[in-house]
Amino acid sequence: MQPRRYRIDLGYEGTAFSGSQRQPGLRTVQGVLEEALARVVAMPVRVALAGRTDAGVHAVGQVASCDLVWRHDAETLVRALRASLPEDIVIYRATVAPAGFHARRCALDREYRYRIWLGTDPPLFLRRFVWVYAGPIDLQALQAAADFFVGTHDFRSFAGHGMGGPAATAPRFRTIDLSEWHLLEPTLEPLWGRAQILEYRVRANGFLPHMVRTMVAALLRVGTGDVSPDWIVELLRVHDRRAAPAPAPARGLVLWRVRYPEDVDCAAGYEQPPLHVSERKGSSEV
């Protein structure tokens, strides 16, 4: 039997993973998924992931592709994987894909979301998924600064892993078409009063290491009044990672969605099940 290309849609809690990409001697999403697939099909399997996530970063919309010799239907593959994987990885679905499908190279864009708990002492079940910030935030300034990211820019000032350091002379262009702040008000017990979560949504054709978390950290400096919104323009101009702040904590970041050409027609009407309710403020959501 010849192998067939499969698309696997999955999510994971990143807390106990050393990132998504396979690394010798470390627990990674790719490594754990490949081990489970190898047990299920009784032969070695290599997978490609749509997006790389750092240690501690979560995903609800990750996509993998791989070639499998599998004699049963896709639903049986999903059940077998769910039985073989640990509880911090969840498989949503598996489908037979065209032979040329590649989870990373075929993707049109990726969307990340970052959440900040406004206040102190978040509920236990949220602590691994938010950055806790107790100070006041200017929501209008946050959105004004976020708007400067929309378009095609050289993001070296926001890139880690040496891609934005003094020796990084190669441009790192990425195109962002969504950069928005949303104010979420989760339904919680009265113990937390009027609890609020800020969520930053950003979508682009690609991202660099630490890029989203560094963007969030820079935007928060604007929101606290330390700098003006147009400081973002200066950071984009200087192409120097040393000019931007350290990345925001990994635990607040989620790879939310990866879109492919066949998904675009229905994407406008499709939304991942929200964890909280979004509140609209005036003409924009912040």
Image (cartoon, rainbow, N blue to C red):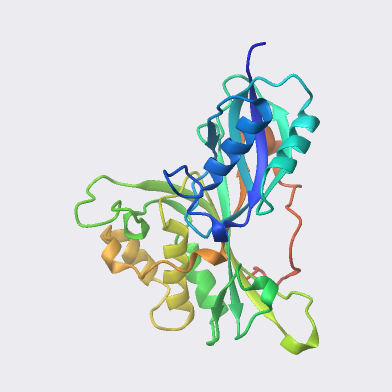
Q: Quadrant of the N terminus?
A: top right
Is residue 193 at all visible to an observer of this figure? no
Which residue is most to the top?
1
State which quadrant residue 265 falls in: top right
Q: Locate residue 92 relative to residue 115 in the image: left or right.
A: right
The residue that appears at 62% across and 36% down in the rendered structure is: 260
The residue drawn where x is 47% and y is 67% is: 216
**Is 260 situated left or right of 166 in this image?**
right
Residue 124 location in percent, x, y?
A: 67, 76
- 50 or 266, nearer to the observer: 50
Q: Position of residue 3 (x, y in %)?
A: 63, 17
Image x and y of residue 283, in percent = 67, 69
Q: Which image quadrant for residue 240?
A: bottom left
Relative vertical location of residue 257 with respect to residue 115 in this rendering, above or below: above
Q: Position of residue 276 (x, y in %)?
A: 74, 68
Q: Quadrant of the C terminus?
A: bottom right
Residue 221 showing in the rendered view: yes
For residue 36, above or below residue 167: above
Query: How many numbered marks, from 0 up?
Result: 0
The image shows residue 34, relative to residue 178, as above or below, that is above
